[in-house]
Structures are given as C-alpha cells and as structure tokens.
Image (cartoon, rainbow, N blue to C red):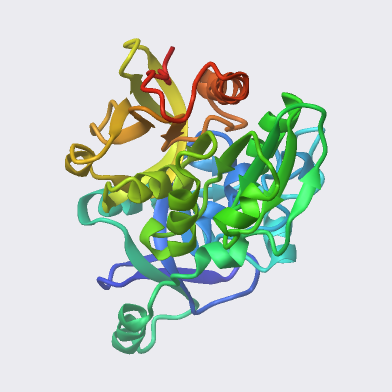
Amino acid sequence: MSKRYLLLEDGTVYEGRAFGAELNDVVGEVVFQTGMTGYQETLSDPSYYGQMVVMTYPLIGNYGINRDDFETVRPALKALIVKEAENDPSNFRSEVSIGEFLKQKGVPGLEGIDTRSLVKKIRQSGTMKGILIDDLANLDQIIDHVKQTSLPKDQVSQVSAAKPYVVPGRGLRVVLVDYGMKHGILRELTERGCHVTVVPYDTTADEVMQLQPDGIMLSNGPGDPKDVSEGIDLVKGLIGKVPIFGICLGHQLISLACGANTERLKFGHRGANHPVKVIETGEAWMTSQNHGYTVSIESIKHTKLKVTHQAINDGSIEGIEHESLPIFSVQFHPESSPGPSDANVLFDQFLNMMNENKAGGVTLCQKEQIFVGS
C-alpha cells in the first residue's frame, strides 16, 4: 500500500497507508466516532456529509459490507480514518470488503495511524479541518490552503430527497421532512403501520398541510441548524396545527423555531454508547448520537420549552418538549441500528400523541403535559 498522510490545519501530520479510493488533496472536518460496531451505518449516514470520520475502535471492516445495513444509498462522508482496515472479512453476510466498497464509491481511506493520539488531540483542541495528501512537500502552502478552505453550508440540500415520495401504509398519516434522513426513521414508522410521505427539506408549511398529515416527523441531517432557514420557517408555520416529533437536526430546528438558541460543541457527540438521563423518570438510556451542535441550556429558559433528556457525560440538552403543545424532540437517534434500542419507545409516544390529537384527547391549545420519558 502507498503512503498517505493526514495533515491538520495546525500543522500536525499523521503518516499511514492508503486504502479505498485513490484520491488525495481531500479537505474536510475531522471528527471521531466512538462506536465499536456500526461502521456501515456511519459510512451511509448523511449527517457525516463532508466530514473525515475517525473510528476510535481499532479494527474496522471485520464483518465486511452488506447493503441491507445501509442508512442511505451512498456514502456522504469525505474520508474514513482507522487504525486497521480489515479487507478479508469473515461474516457470511459480507458482499464486499470495506476497502473495495470505498474504492467503488470514491471515498478515500487512511489506515495505520495512531487514532488514539488523533482523537486525544481533537478532544483537547476541538474539531478542526484536515487534508489527505500523498507527500509532504510544500507543507506551509498546503496548511494555508486548508485554513482558507471553507466548509460547506449547503449540506442539507445535498443529501435531502429531490422530490416527494410515498411509502404507503394503512395507519396514521405522517409527513417525514428529509434533512438527510436515515432509513432507520422510515423503518420505525412503517413498522408501526404509518402511511409516510417523505418530502424535501425546502417544502413549505402550506405544502405540508395540503397532505393532511396526522403528524410531522423532522429527520436528522448535517451541518449548522442555523443554515437551514427553510426548516426553521417550516416549524414556525406548523406549530399549533399538528403534532411534531424531531430527531437530531430536527430537534435543533424545533428549538430555534420556538425561540431557543444553538451552539457548536467543541468536538461533538458521535457514537453508539452515549448515556442520557430521562428527567421525568430518572432512567438512564444508552443512545446513538451524531451531532456537532447543541441547544443552549440558558436559551431554553426564555421559551415555552422544557428539558426532558440530558446528557450524563457533559450535561448538554438531549430532549425537549413544549409546555402546552404536542411537540417534542430528541438530540440522539432512537432509530439507531445497530446500537442501543432503549429509546425506540419514542416512536410509540409519537403515535400516541397523534392518536390523542385525532381523538380530541389533547387539543393544540390545551396545557396538558406530554412526558417523553413516561
């Protein structure tokens, strides 16, 4: 294998071996993911759009690649960085090795570096930009290039559905707004019999209401939520009209639309082992997460939102609900697979909320608490 280097914008160099696609001079945001399994879901999660993902678990690729476990059709990440890439998988479901898959999809990989050292650096210094290069000539010029390269702000438009489509069902009618949707969200809704209409990120509130939904689902997605003005306007136009459930980016868009603020985390939460406290019950859930932004705790105090879930590791907000309206959201991924399934009950809560609203048990102006953790 040929040599390949990761150069961070602060000048730090990591030497490793190339695998996957033969691409260099690739610039992206370097982030780390702490899951011991789920590299296929990471490769296919649109929320990683434009990022170079460092896997903290040392061996990646041992069970190969199979299309059944994908969250989208194609990878969205910029590059994959691992300690060791196993290109001779030993699982009966494997269809192709991880290296061959990345080569087919045009995604470069880097293996053989000290990922523990790299992750420690990101934790201490914060997320930063990096570039994959094949030689160390003209380092100063390359560092200047990396520093001057702007990260994309149109990630959602790149990963959202191009046009609406329907996944038919005989149950409740849900409009699922695709900001970079993981297929796991769609799977959880269809398994519960929902009739789901998936719509693009820039669909208006009037267009959504014309579909006569029983509820609105706001999906996960990449980037800074403040860059998705279409999503904020959509939520503002739907509040008080129909029950709403948001996940990850959808959670942040609900918070912004209700008057709260969001802020960037130092290095983000990414992985399948993040403990979250359910405020109402005192339970601790193990959750899957993938986000670089969070809702500001201080800003919640000036809204009609209340905190329902909180990260045990750093105290950041992991879930909110409206004081009087059927609106709730979580920062983590209750649809995660593989990974913890503690939070799957939230989809049942969403169905209960829609059924109660249809039956008149909860009106949109009634101040009745809907406890996310109950």
In the picture, which quadrant includes the C terminus? top left
**Quarter holding residue 23:** bottom right
Picture residue at 55% right of the left edge, 41% below the top: 59
Is 153 located above or below residue 59 in the figure? Answer: below
Could you say which is closer to the camera, residue 247 or residue 277? 247
For the question of whether residue 313 can be seen, the reply is yes
Percent from the top left, x then y, of residue 176? Answer: 63, 44
Percent from the top left, x then y, of residue 345? Answer: 55, 19
Could you say which is closer to the camera, residue 272 or residue 346? 346
In this figure, what is the number of numbered marks?
0
Specify whether 70 is left or right of 286: right
Percent from the top left, x then y, of residue 261? Answer: 26, 50
Picture residue at 30% right of the left edge, 79% below the top: 147
Is 77 located above or below residue 237 in the figure? Answer: below
Specify whether 185 is left or right of 299: right
Could you say which is closer to the camera, residue 239 or residue 199? 239
In the picture, which quadrant includes the N terminus? bottom right
Percent from the top left, x then y, of residue 57? Answer: 47, 39
Is 359 located above or below residue 3 in the figure? Answer: above
For the question of whether residue 16 can be seen, the reply is no
Specify whether 190 is left or right of 247: right
Picture residue at 49% right of the left edge, 62% below the top: 230
Picture residue at 33% right of the left edge, 14% below the top: 280
